[in-house]
Image (spheres, rainbow, N blue to C red):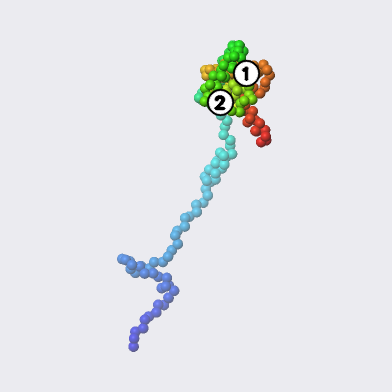
Amino acid sequence: MPATRRKPSNPSTRAQQTLAFGPNANKVTKPSLPPQPKKLPKTQSDSLSLSEAVAEIATPSPSPAPEDEQAQHQAQLSNPRTLAIRNQQAATTDVKSSDIEVTAAKVPETQVRKYWRAKEEERIAPRVHQKGLSVNEKILRHFDLSSQYGPCIGIPRVKRWKRAQGLGLHPPIEVLAVLLKEEAAKNGKAERAFMEGLLTSRLAVNE
């Protein structure tokens, strides 16, 4: 009669066991969950630090002392850009307007036309779209486009001429003579650059 295999008394526990290989061959391993970190109780120090942080955010920073404001003001004055602007303004005010205007008022009309004739001879081709303009208007528009004397937008022509003279750029005396003549004739359009009038008219139309 063949031998029968003996069945285990508790099959459920035997099914959970797994085989282990190595020196501990008879050891039975079971799956286990990883240990969870313990929740520490909220201490009083944590609540105090949170309240201190909230108080620090809510409290505004103190205003700088008068000495700090004076130091910042001195630093702004020593800025190279600020110094350049102040030197430019000083150069404008240092020009003796009365003497220059007296000299420009004595410039004859023949000298003005001779100056413009020399400018025309420097060109290879004749100018276009200026047939209906006077010689004075041509000279002023040429002065507007002469970038070596600074920007022409946002500043009167006379002030731009005097500023260039104060900076040692030596603008033509004929231009100032034309400006004085137009001012005596009460020509308000001659005070500003022609390009500035075009820009302001376009802005008015767009508005």
Q: Quadrant of the N terminus?
A: bottom left
- Position of 77 with respect to 33 (left or right) is right
The CA span between labels 2 and 1 is 24 Å
Residue occupying image coordinates x 63% and y 16%: 180
The answer to whether one can see residue 74 in this image is: no
In the image, taking residue 16 as reference, residue 67 lies left or right, namely: right
> How far from the left and from the top, in percent, is residue 77?
53, 23
Total tally of numbered discs in the picture? 2
Do we see residue 205 in this rendering?
Answer: yes
Q: Quadrant of the C terminus?
A: top right
Q: Quadrant of residue 132?
A: top right
**Residue flagged by tag 1: what amino acid is it?**
Leu
Q: What amino acid is found at the position of numbered circle 2 in the picture?
A: Pro
Q: Is residue 77 above or below residue 36?
A: above
Residue 48 location (% of width, % of height): 54, 43
Q: Residue at x 43, y 63 (%)?
A: 32
Q: Quick check: marks 2 and 1 in contact, CB under 8 Å?
A: no
Residue situated in front as seen by the camera: 140 or 166: 140
Residue at numbered disc 2: 126
x and y, in percent, of residue 104 in the image: 60, 13
Q: How dense is the environment of label 1, judged by Cα within 10 Å: few (below 14), some, or many (20 and up)?
A: many
Residue 99 vs residue 197, the one in the foreground: 197
Residue hosting label 1: 179
Location of residue 181 in the rendering, given as x and y in whole percent from the top left corner: 64, 16
Query: Taking 167 as reference, is 197 above or below it?
Result: below
Instruction: State which mark lies toward you, 2 or 1.
Output: 2
Few, some or many C-alpha atoms within 10 Å of disc 2 (few <14, some 14-19, many ≥20)? few
- Mark with earlier residue (2, 1): 2
Q: Secondary structure at mark 2?
A: loop
Picture residue at 39% right of the left edge, 79% below the top:
7
> Which residue lies at the image location 40% right of the left edge and 77% below the top edge?
8
